[in-house]
Image: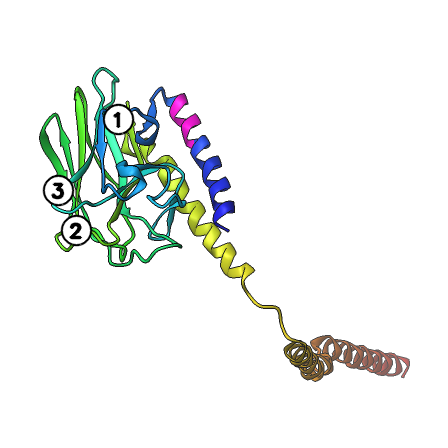
Amino acid sequence: MKKIAAILIIAAALTAVCRAAEDGSVITYLSDMEWKAAEIYSDANGGVPSRDENVAGEELWLYDLYFEKGVCLHAAPGKNVFIEVDIEGKGFRTFYAYPGTAESELYDVTMASVNFIFKVDGKTVLRTEKITPKKRPEPISFDVTGAKLLRIEMTDGGDGISGDWGSLGAALFSTSDDIGLISAAIKGERDVTAATEQTEVKTETEPLTEEAATEEKTGKLTEAVTEKPAVKEEKNVNPAVYIVAAAVVLAAAAAVTAALKKKKAGK
C-alpha cells in the first residue's frame, strides 16, 4: 500500500505545483538543490544527508506520514550534523518543512530523539523542542527574504545517537509568503496518506468464514420471517376498510330515508 500511496502523493504534489505556477510563486525542494556543505554521522549514507529517503535508503515516512520529498540526517557523537545551502539571489521568502524522525522497516529506531536548529545568515531563527517518533510532525516555517545562507543543524537530543534519524519532510523554499498556498502540497500528502490508511483497513478485513456466512444468512431470513406478521397486521387495520364500510352504511341509511319519505308522500 505504501507504493500506492507514493503514486497518489506524486499526483497530489504535481497538482500543488500547478496551483503554485498559476499563482506565480515558485517552490524549490531542499533535496533538489546543490548544498554548499553537509555532514552527518560518518557510518550513515557515506556521511552525507539522504535525499528523498531515510539514511538506510527506504521511503521517507515520519510517524504515519509519507513524504515524496525531504531530507534525512543521522546524529553524530560530540557535534551537530548539518546542511548548508546558498540561497542568495534566488528570491525565496519562506522555508517550510515537517521536522520529525524517520521510520524504518529494517532497523529499530524507536529510541530516536533529536533537535533541529535553523540559522539564517548565522542567526538562529528557530530551534525545535526535542523530537521523537511518538508524535506526528507539525509544519514549521520562517522568513528567509533577502537571506544568503541557511544552515540546518541537528543535535542528538542529549541522549546518544542511537536511532537518531532526524528528517525534514517536504523541506522546501518558496518565493511566496502565503502559508496556505505553500502548505497545499503538504496537506494533500497528509490527506492522501489518511485515505490510503482507511483503504488498507478495508482491504485487510477478512472474508466471512462459511460458518459465519451461514449464520449471517440465517439471521437475515429470521428477520424477514418476523417482519411478515407485522405487514399482515398492518393490512388488517387499514383505515380504507373502515372508510368503505362507513360509506356503505351511509348509503344504506340514505336509501331507507328516501323510501320512507316516498311512502309518506304517497299517503
Mark whose residue sits in front, 2 or 3: 3
Which residues lie in the magenta part? 16-21
Provide residue 187's location: percent of width, then percent of height: 37, 41
**Residue furthest left as drawn:** 123
Q: CA distance from mark 2 to mark 3?
A: 16 Å
Does residue 111 appear left or right of residue 3 in this picture? left
Q: CA distance from mark 1 to mark 3?
A: 20 Å
**Residue furthest right as drawn:** 266
Determine which residue is flagged by label 3: 79
Q: Which mark is residue 35?
A: 1
Which residue is located at x 33 percent, y 22 percent?
25
Provide residue 248's location: percent of width, then percent of height: 80, 79
**In front: 17, or 163?**
163
Q: Main secondary structure of the magenta part?
A: helix
Q: Which tag, 2 or 3, sits closer to the chain's start?
A: 3
The answer to whether any part of residue 137 appears in the image is yes
Amino acid beneath label 1: Trp
Contact? badges 2 and 3 (CB < 8 Å) = no
Mark 2 neighbour class, 10 Å CA radius: few under 14, some 14 to 19, many 20 or more: some
**In front: 224, or 52?**
52
**Quadrant assignment, res 236:** bottom right
Provide residue 214's location: percent of width, then percent of height: 68, 79
**In front: 7, or 51?**
51
Amino acid beneath label 3: Lys
Amino acid beneath label 2: Lys
Would residue 266 be counted in the magenta stretch?
no
Determine which residue is flagged by label 2: 130
**Element under disc 3:** loop
